Amino acid sequence: MSPLSRFGNDLPFLTALRHDLHAHPELGFEEERTSAIVARHLEEAGLTVHRGLGKTGVVATLQVGNGQRRIGLRADMDALAMPEKPDRPYKSTVPGKMHACGHDGHTTMLLGAARHLAASRNFSGTVHFIFQPAEEGRGGARKMVEDGLFDRFPCDAVYGLHNMPGLDVDEMAVVEGPQLASSDSWRLTFKGIGTHGAKPHLGRDPITAAGSFLAALQSIVGRVVDPLQPAVVSACSVQAGDPQALNVIPDLVEIGGTARAYSPHVRDQLEEEIGRLAHGTAAMFGIEVHYDFIRRIPPVINDADATRRALTAARTVFGEKARTAFPPSTAGDDFSFFAAEAPGCYVWLGNGPAIDGALHHNTSYDFNDDAIAAGVAFWTTLVEQELAGE
C-alpha cells in the first residue's frame, strides 16, 4: 500500500481547511483566527495543547508509549502583506493580505499528521507539533524560543518543511548542509549640506556620494568575499530629495538593503565591508554617515544525523524521487533559531509547476492541494520511523 493512500479519507477535510485558511490570511503575530482553528482541531484529536508562546503560537504534544526520544515538527502560519490577483473560489477575503508562500498548506499538512498520529499511535516517544507565527520577517521563531519553547518542550531533533514550486508533488529534496542563507538588513544615512542645485559648490552633495557608494557596493561580493562562498548584497531602498523640488540638493540620502550568506565568516565580512565602504565614501566626499547592520535571521544549516533520519522517511514515501541534491536558496527562514536549539533538518516538498511564473511571494502563487497527502505522509512516516519502539 502506498504511504499516501492512508490519508485519503481525511483529504476532503484537509483541503477544505486549507482553502479556509487561504481565504482568511493573517500577518505575523496577528494569527488569532488561525491559531484558534489549529488549537481546536488539535484538542479535538486528543493532543495536549499550549497557546501563547510567541504571542499567537501553538504547541501540541503527543506522547505515546515509553520511548524517551522527543522531536519537534514545525509549520509556519502567517501570510504576507500583498494582494492576491487570481479570482479563485477561496481567494483572500482580506484586502492587501494573502498566503503567497504556502503557509496555509504547511499548517494544514502538520495538522493532518497530528490527527493521524493521534488516532494511530504507531510510535513510542514524544512529538511536539509547533505551529509558529510570524515567519515572514517579524521574528516569530526567535520570540517562541525567548518565551521558553525548548525549555518547556525539549527536543532531541527538530524538523521543518517548506513547499517548493518547480519540484513535482511526488518529489522531496532532503540535503545535508546549507539550505537557506542568513537574512540581515542594513541601513545608512549620508548627511551632507543641502544647497541650490545650480550652486553645488556651496554645499556637500550626499546624492553624488550615494551614487558612488551604490556603484561600488557589488565590489564586496565580487572582490572581497571568497568566490567559492555564496553571498548577496542588495540595495533595495533609496530615499533622497523631493521630486517637486528639482533644483534642491538635499541634506540627506537614506539607503537600505539586505545581505545574505551561508557562513558566519562571510556574514561578518558583509557587515564589516558595507560599513567600510559607507565610511570610506563619506570621507571621500567630506560628509557624514550613520550606518546600522541589523542581524535578523541566521542561515539554515541541516544537521547530518537529522538529515539522515529525514531522508529515510522521505525515501519511504517518495522512493527514488527523494532527492539528495538541490541548490540552496538565498531566501531566509527563521527555522534557524529552532535548529540552533536542537539538531535540525529543513526539507523541500514539491508544489508542482510554477504556473504563469507564480513562485513564492508572487501575487498569483497558490499552494498545490495535491501536495497535502504527500506532506502528511512524510510527517507521519518520519515520526513512526524515528520513534519506532524506543
Image (tube, rainbow, N blue to C red):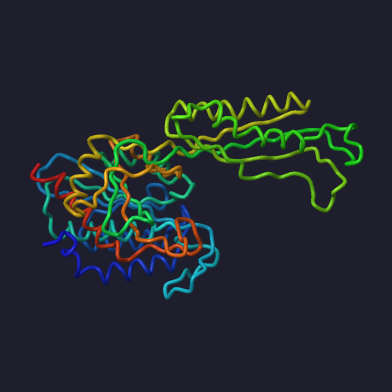
* Quarter of the N terminus within the rendering: bottom left
- Residue at the left extreme? 389
Q: Position of residue 31 (x, y in %)?
A: 43, 58
User: Number of labelled discs?
Assistant: 0
- Residue at the bottom extreme? 89
81 or 354: nearer the viewer: 354
Q: Position of residue 33 (x, y in %)?
A: 41, 63
Q: Is residue 305 left or right of residue 202?
A: left
102 or 24: nearer the viewer: 102
Residue 51 seen = no
223 or 333: nearer the viewer: 223
Q: Is residue 124 left or right of residue 79?
A: left
| Residue at image coords 40%, 44% | 141
Q: Check the image and report above or below for 193 versus 6.
A: above
Corner quadrant of residue 312: top left
Q: Position of residue 147 (x, y in %)?
A: 38, 41
* Quarter of the C terminus within the rendering: top left
378 or 232: nearer the viewer: 232
Corner quadrant of residue 202: top right
Q: Is residue 218 left or right of residue 208?
A: left
| Residue at image coords 25%, 40% | 307
Q: Check the image and report above or below for 16 versus 73.
A: below
Q: Position of residue 50 (x, y in %)?
A: 30, 51
Residue 251 seen = yes
